Image (cartoon, grey):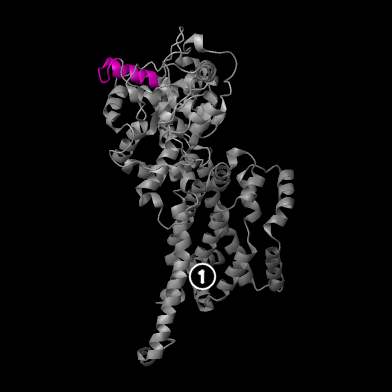
Amino acid sequence: MAILSPINRRSWRGRLLVGAIYALLTAGAACMVIPLGLVLAGSTKSVADQREARLVPGFLQHEQLLWQKHLEALFNESVDAMNIALDTSWTTFADARLPAEGEAPGEEWVEAWEAFLASGALPAAAFLQGHYWAPQAGAFPVALRGFREALQWRFGTLDALNQALGTDFEAWYDVFAQPPATLFPHSDVPESAVVQALRDYTATSAPAWTRSVACAEGYWHRLFLKPRYGPGLEEVNRALGTGYRSWAEIPFPETLHLMSDLLCEGGPPEPEEGAAAAGVEGENAEKPEDSTVISPRDAGEAATWMMEPTPAFGVVWRQFAGQSLSSRWRTVDGRLRTPDHLWNAWLRETGRVPADGAWVPMPQLAYHARLFREHRTAIRREFLWRNYRTVLDYVLFHGRGILNTVVYCALAVLLALLVNPLAAYALSRAKLRATNQVLFFLMLTMAFPHMVTQIPVFILLRELGLLNTFAALLLPGMASGYSIFLLKGFFDSLPQELYESAQIDGAGEWTLFWQLTMRLSTPILSVIALQAFTVAYANFMYALLICQSPKMWTLMVWLYQLQQRSGPGVVQASLILAAIPTLAVFLACQRVLLRGIVVPVEK
């Protein structure tokens, strides 16, 4: 019977009521869709945008946000690494602005830079692999996946890889080489075979937009001078007795020692108050007598950058180049061969700048901005699916989680559809005196939470020697009081005339159970199967307690282990992927659940 008759629906009150009902239904649907949309958007996040709350990820709409996520991945979530490589002073990745086309510093040198990279003048140690390590996000970026695939293609099996490289990886998921810090002195130790394999992959196989070049000049500016003397150029000028007007004017010589007759022992002397003030007042200020350093960038002087350096500058330079820079970039005679010097030497050799021309910084910011625009589709696709690829790589190639879950769920559903209907059928057909007492006892089992029964169940299974087996997972939940109660009530509602007719035809109890009762009970059996699958699939705490061996862990346990070492984006991606099997089973059972029983059968 309809709530409103056709006549009432045409009145203004009826239409207002129908409109209010539809509005409430729409609001209810929105309350379900919006959280789902937030989870879907959150599954694509990294550290750069993890605080966003959008239904559509920002990097899909705004190029600037995609650029920031790209820089975060390119420098493996390290702001210091970004500032060193690009010689910038950004505090966070959110400060990084994508330069407009043609406006990036060094844009005119990008073609020469590409030719320099293709010339093979740089050693493998000069390249830094980006999109490789995400320690905070916990994802497997594209370069890490590519590195593992390259090793798998090269060695075939994990045992062959371990034997060849001297490693002890237990699974392909564990294959990882710590990215070497090539500019620092602690990187002078001999490199392992797996690190050398990573260097070979970076130099030969990695996509161009996933790698950068170590910038020693950026290290000199951003990670040596700034932490030592302060974030501003004024502090550096005051300490060194210089008058540089920009960070670009600070020399980056080609030799370890500068005019030894001007070098003094010990640290930089404190400049006089007047000299310090003169060094920071601007380009027209009169500079102190011992701190006249004219930038070859402005004056076009020799590229050796040895224009009367102050004694304080010489001491600091010797500390940097001799103690804080890796020895791999120094020759025996004390000359520096960093990527910056190799780049400028190549420019002079190829005639792109005069032999005594000005110093040209590496144009990495302009170069990566161009690569970003050329490959933004691939970069956007990488961030869209990276977290999902991480979850799939983890669960598919780490342990036996998928196989254990499939076996466990299949046996749980099979036992639920066998044990519970048999018990309910006996209670429904036998008409025992204690039927109500039995049902009451079965319902009492629902009064105790699973957390309360886990300890005695664990002790019992341990005494029986069943821990770390499928029997331990299945036996305690094989019979469900709630399922038996539902089935018994459903069996009682079936027409008794059908049973009497079947008995007249000579059907026995097994025939009545299998051919009649089970066939008529398809909808309720679908409910029981769906419930058994959901309980088994989502079983985490009990599965971890009973099966402590990783060989018997189910999918939920492995996902929990992944979530402990991952960021919010990977966690939300794992939740979405984990919900897909449950949704698929529900959709498979939906038609059966909504189908009628008695009327279609009788017809």
Quadrant for the C terminus in the image: bottom left
Q: Give the range drawn in magenta.
A: 340-355
Q: Residue at x 42, y 19 (%)?
A: 338
Q: Residue at x 64, y 50 (%)?
A: 542
Residue 335's place in the image compared with 168, above or below, is above
Q: Foreground residue, 11 or 83?
A: 83
Residue 589 x %, y %: 45, 62
Q: Is residue 351 magenta?
A: yes
Q: Which SS type dominates the magenta stretch?
A: helix
Taking the image as shown, residue 409 lies to the left or right of residue 430, namely left
Callout 1: 10 Å neighbours few (<14), some, many (20+)?
few
Quadrant for the N terminus in the image: bottom left
Three-letter amino acid code at disc 1?
Gly
Q: Residue at x 54, y 52 (%)?
A: 537
Local secondary structure at mark 1: loop
Judged from this view, the residue extending furthest toward the top is: 333
